[in-house]
Amino acid sequence: MGGELRFQGRAFVFEDNIDTDAIFPANWLILTDEKEIASHCMEEIDPDFHRKAKPGDILLAGANFGCGSSREHAPLAIRGCGISCVVAKSFSRLFYRNAVNIGLPVITADTASLAAEGDEVAVDCVTGEISIRKANAAAGAVVKLAGEPLPEFMLEILRSSGLYGYLEKRLKLEGRI
């Protein structure tokens, strides 16, 4: 991924309190392949989510997204579906860090109440700027809002495609590998 950390895609909108069991059911935790993991993403809420999501789409959610157990499978499932970024009113602390650590950008902003599935969303993770073009609105009708930009060290982790890439880059720079 790396690069500018700016994304544009179709919105998928979810409510408050979507827990990790809803994102990725526990009975599939034995899976290790990201594509297989992705095939069960959000299946309890929307069984066709993994088929509808396309590379670059953006997931918008309400408060407390990713609450529940601390499993990396949840952000892996989302990333495996091609979702480029998750924007939520608030995140579970563990989900938030797991997402960053595996290279899935997350931004805190209250967008779910402003958007509908299919709206076009643009997110800039560096500045926190978000715009939503309503799918059913007249041309030029855009909602703009300011999300919470990510700290520089998290941006570096995301630019390195996750924590492992970041650590490898740092160790190379230090001449330790």
Image (cartoon, rainbow, N blue to C red):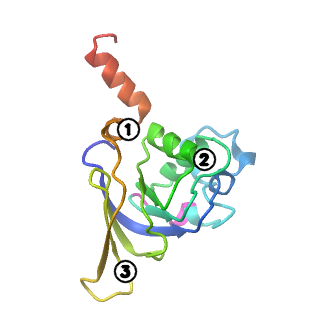
Helix, strand or loop status at disc 1: loop
Q: Is residue 47 left or right of residue 103?
A: right
Residue under label 2 = 37
Residue under label 3 = 134
Question: Where residue 93 sits in the image (x, y, percent)?
Answer: 54, 45
The amino acid at mark 2 is Ile
Q: What stretch is highlighted in magenta?
A: 50-55
Question: Where residue 167 sits in the image (x, y, percent)?
Answer: 38, 24
Residue occupying image coordinates x 59% and y 65%: 16
Q: Can residue 53 be seen in this view?
A: no
Q: In this view, does 32 lie to the left or right of 97?
A: right
Res. 41 image quadrant: bottom right
Residue occupying image coordinates x 75% and y 47%: 27
Residue under label 1 = 161
Q: Is 18 or 108 nearer to us in this picture?
A: 108
Instruction: Answer whether residue 93 is magenta in the image.
Output: no
Question: Where residue 69 sits in the image (x, y, percent)?
Answer: 67, 44
Disc 3 versus disc 1: distance between alpha carbons? 30 Å
Disc 2 versus disc 1: distance between alpha carbons? 19 Å
Q: Is residue 8 visible?
A: yes
